[in-house]
Amino acid sequence: MPKPKTPAQIAGAAAEEIRALNHVTLDPKSLRYPPHVSETAQALVQMIDRLPQALLQVSEAVRRHASQRLIRMDDGTDPAKAADEVMNNLADAIRDVGQLSTSLHFAASVLFHMGTERRDL
């Protein structure tokens, strides 16, 4: 049985998949018709909607590590202050992803209703 992937490996693989999406969509033929754009947008909505949970769980891990005094800063600064800064920035990111999600949902909603006049799909 294969060894389970770490959270960092899974996040890295997700980043690589987004990089691959960015590369493939450089080719205009990859999103040839409106339904292809819609399918891609719907999948991006799902991805973005799952991101806040991951960010929240990362923030919780930092909080837990700070409360257990497991954090040591390599520059000697106060780890509690650094942990607070990380958690505040992650809270901002979660809020910002929520705004991104709302906009993406609106765009995907309109895209969902787009078809094509082409009959040779």
Image (spheres, helix red, strand yellow):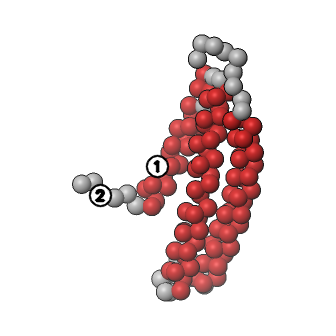
Q: Is residue 118 visible?
A: yes
Residue at the spot of label 2: 3
Q: Position of residue 43 (x, y in %)?
A: 58, 42
Name the one closer to the observer, 67 or 1.
1
Q: CA distance from mark 2 to mark 1?
A: 15 Å
**Observer-nearest residue: 109 or 20?**
109
Relative to 100, is 23 on the left or the right?
A: left
In the image, residue 35 lies at what x, y percent? 64, 28
Apparent side of residue 10 relative to residue 28 in the rendered image (left or right): left
Q: Quadrant of the C terminus?
A: top right
The residue under the point 66% across, 15% down is 118
Q: Residues within 10 Å of mark 1 (few under 14, many from 20)?
A: few
Q: Is residue 35 above or below residue 79?
A: above
Callout 2, which amino acid?
Lys
Closer to the camera, 114 or 9? 114
In the rendered structure, the answer to whether residue 110 lies left or right of residue 39 reads: right
Q: Identify the residue at image location x=61%, y=37%.
A: 40
Give the side of residue 103 with respect to residue 41, left or right.
right
Q: Quadrant of residue 97?
A: bottom right
Name the secondary structure under disc 1: helix
Count of marks overlaid on the render: 2
| Farthest residue, direction left | 1
Where residue 92 appears, as percent x and y from the top left, is 71, 66
Please tell me whether residue 8 is drawn above or below residue 70 in the rendered image: above
What residue sits right under mark 1 in the picture?
13
**Residue in view at x 72 percent, y 41 percent:** 109
The image shows residue 76, relative to residue 11, as above or below, that is below
Frontmost residue, 94 versus 85: 94
**Label 2 residue SS:** loop
Residue 81 location, x and y as percent? 64, 82
Amino acid of disc 1: Ala
Q: Residue furthest top?
A: 120
